[in-house]
Amino acid sequence: MAQVLVRNLDESVVEKLKARAADNGRSLQAELKAILEAQAQLVSKAEARIIAARIRRRIGSRSQTDSGILQAEDRLR
């Protein structure tokens, strides 16, 4: 398994991470690992743009109602 070393972190950042780890019942190392793994699973901006373009193509020809109008109508009920 790979190892990563992060240098020159501000002490306040480390303290916040330690507090977060304690809140989650984990060691600092386990908390950092969980944070990095979660971030690695996120969709990149490029992937998000591709997904958004695909959605726009699928719904592009449909007429859309302004959400403000829908909210106003809902309040009148």
Image (spheres, helix red, strand yellow):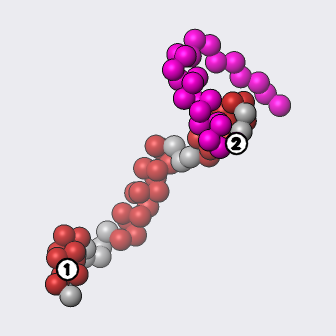
Residue that extends furthest to the right in the rendered view of this protein: 1
Image coordinates for residue 35, horizontal then vertical, percent:
62, 38
Q: Which residues are magenta?
A: 1-25
Disc 2 marks which amino acid? Gly
Q: Secondary structure at mark 2?
A: loop
- Please state which of residues 50 and 31 is positioned toward the viewer in this rendering: 31
Which quadrant of the rendered structure holds the N terminus? top right
Question: Residue 40: in sight, yes or no?
Answer: no
Residue closest to the eye, 20 or 31: 20
Gap in angstroms between the C-alphas marked 2 and 1 = 44 Å
Q: Is residue 6 magenta?
A: yes
Q: Is residue 63 left or right of residue 27?
A: left
Residue ID for mark 1: 75
Q: Nearer the viewer, mark 2 or mark 1?
A: 2
The residue carrying pointer 1 sits among few (fewer than 14), some (14 to 19) or many (20 or more) residues within 10 Å by Cα, namely few
Res. 68 image quadrant: bottom left
Q: Residues within 10 Å of mark 2 (few under 14, many from 20)?
A: few
At a point 65% along the width and 36% down the height, the residue shown is 21
**Residue 13 in view in this figure:** yes
- Residue under label 2, please give it: 25
Q: Is residue 9 above or below residue 70?
A: above
* For residue 48, side relative to residue 37 (left or right): left
Residue 54 belongs to the span the image colors magenta = no
Above or below residue 1? Residue 66 is: below
Q: Are marks 2 and 1 in contact (CB under 8 Å)?
A: no
Q: Residue at x 79, y 27 (%)?
A: 2
